[in-house]
Amino acid sequence: MNLKEFARQLGLSPTTVSRALNGYPEVNEATRERVMAAAKRLNYRPNSRAQRLATGRAMAIGHVIPIANKHEMVNPVFADFIAGAGETYSRNGYDMVLSVVPDNDEEAAYRELKARGTVDGVIVHGPRMDDPRVRLLTEIGLPFVVHGRASGSQTPYSWLDVNNRRAFRRATDFLLDLGHRRIALVNGLEFMDFAMRRRIGFTEAQEARGLMPAPELMSSAEMTEGRGHAMAASMLALPEPPTAFLVASMISGMGVRRAVEERGLRIGRDVSIIIHDDDLSYMKNGEDVPIYTATRSSVREAGRQAAEILLSLITDPSGEPQTRLLEAELIIGQSTGPVPAPART
Amino acid sequence: MNLKEFARQLGLSPTTVSRALNGYPEVNEATRERVMAAAKRLNYRPNSRAQRLATGRAMAIGHVIPIANKHEMVNPVFADFIAGAGETYSRNGYDMVLSVVPDNDEEAAYRELKARGTVDGVIVHGPRMDDPRVRLLTEIGLPFVVHGRASGSQTPYSWLDVNNRRAFRRATDFLLDLGHRRIALVNGLEFMDFAMRRRIGFTEAQEARGLMPAPELMSSAEMTEGRGHAMAASMLALPEPPTAFLVASMISGMGVRRAVEERGLRIGRDVSIIIHDDDLSYMKNGEDVPIYTATRSSVREAGRQAAEILLSLITDPSGEPQTRLLEAELIIGQSTGPVPAPART
DNA sequence: CCGATTTTCCAAAGCGCTTTGAAGACTGCG
DNA sequence: CGCAGTCTTCAAAGCGCTTTGGAAAATCGG
């Protein structure tokens, strides 16, 4: 069933039907209702391929996911972000197109998306410091929003980020207030912008009190259970082990917990842990009472909002870049407590 | 830059250029090379919107993700499946379109995808017993592959599944061989087809030895850390607690571990745990040595293969439904051991 | 009641590609 | 050299929609 046939059955011209369907004012309200009703009855939906060609808009947003053996983006955080963004897209009639590409083809993937007109804009995931994608996308003129920030970029660009620095500074302060002095950082990979900012917040808080963060207590690796475990285990084996951990994610946190428990220590009493909680649907930090003390910020909500920014950029291409900084809240759970008495062999 | 302009610059007709680009035989090899070179040099790529309209193919595969407060599909398993499928799609020039819809609109979403011609086929996620989507998609004629199976469906359909029943039967046998008799099942929601099959494997193994699985040791809920913890905790509080757990996923497994450790029991000695491991990239079951004994089957590989089946279905629409059953392997880790001596208070 | 608006509808021209049907340019062979 | 047969190339007709520029119908003011 196409427009021509549908219009014929209604005894109207394709023009009028198209306008009725798309809400143009120059069609009688009675006619519009008749058209709408018939569309529903006959299950007529304009062919999206034709629509896209005719309007010149793709009505789709792209997400490029680099795939490789290392550092891949296919993680639970990404899944929740996608879910949030997807909600916004479908509410606005946009499709979400995912491109899974080998990570050395990433630039080519963006160029192709632009040249072929497959999407109207993209969201950039996992920005690094001075991320080359910002310049590339500006150059080829494909609207985009960065999830996170790309410190060091010269040109202005749109982004949405969590205030990672402040969140980690606050969490560190919280531990310091509890009397902890040997605080460990189990960070993500520090060429990632967010991880770098977290580290700054972590050191800042200590320096503000005249303390020097111990280098042997700062580690950084991929945010997996295994890496979290390894980092925590080796730090707990130090002559002067940490009494508290600041951990980059729920998943690394599970590894840290495993390491702590392997040494027969109790969390919240012998060792304190604060994690960053992305509020993932399948990895809740406790159903009602939080398990971990955490800096929390919903990545799903971030997805929703980033998508909104992008759509507004597409609708109004003349507009200035938009930026939005979300604050994380500090959730007090059962994984933190005052520093234990020093007489621990 | 469009075809017309590009052809003009080459001094050829659009017809010839199109044919050269698409590998048709009726164009001189020398001409083709000239065209290819120019396309690269001038960065010409055929507009995908026009191509789709002209060919009548969408060159895209849809994945509908129902979103709601409960039972959502946005989970780490889904993310890895998508990554696998995405690899196959991009290798074959297909796009992946994700539709995030409220879960009561799911049927409408499929109908729309078909009516608007947005995609050439879909992959069905999280099938339940007698899943209505199988009939719907067959009826509207949208090619599809089910990830999992929908027991009870009348019409034949294409699917790719893991042999969950055999995997759980084997795992149960393994525990029985270790002397365990109080074995608990921490299952996923049992209206999901895979969970139901796992339960069958679990009970079958016991019945085959003349044992009756204890109803109080069979639980089923969403596969989150929190639910896993709750189920295990309540079973450990029983007068006759289980000595072993069979757990539906890595994530529930973390909750089970937490429950076990909270009671001061040691995994692998006091309590054995076997999980099902989807081999997720961000949730590896140990980097080199497995942490958990597990039934393992890569969901990413499943994504790759399911996508292949779907593409072949689209290429050859006359073909019969295709099915593929993957076997899980049993990985022996450190979380299982012989049943402890009965004299445990 | 008539000309001027306003409302409602339509014919036709794209959007940028693929593909059919046909024509021009070469070949080989008698 | 001429003709059938094969290679190359092309003009033009879609694909199913939107949108421009009018035209017909309805409404209004005087």
Image (spheres, coloured by chain):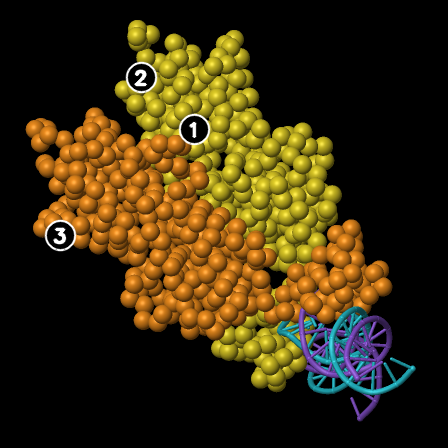
Chain colours: A orange, B yellow, C cyan, D purple
Label 3 to label 2: alpha-carbon separation = 46 Å
A46 over B214 or under it: above or below: below
Q: Chain of mark 2?
A: B
Determine the chain carrying the residue at label 3: A
In 3D space, how far apart are the residues under numbered discs 1 and 2 (Cα atoms)?
Answer: 22 Å
Residue corresponding to mark 2 = B270
- Picture residue at 47% right of the left edge, 45% below the top: B79
Q: Is residue A313 above or below residue B2?
A: above
Look at label 2 and name its amino acid: Asp
Question: Mark 2, residues whose alpha carbon is within 10 Å: few (<14), some, or many (≥20)?
Answer: many
Give x and y (percent) for residue A190: 26, 53
- Label drawn at residue B227: 1
Describe residue A255's horizontal placement relative to residue B213 as left or right. Answer: left
* Disc 3 residue crowd, few under 14, some 14–19, many 20+, Cα 10 Å: few
* Residue at 38%, 62% in the rendered image: A323
- Find residue A109 and report its horizontal and vertical position in percent: 47, 63
Q: Quadrant of residue D1?
A: bottom right
Say above or below: B214 vs A305: above
State whether discs 1 and 2 lie on one chain.
yes
Image point (38%, 39%), residue name: B283
Label 1 packing within 10 angstroms: few (<14), some (14-19), many (20+) = many
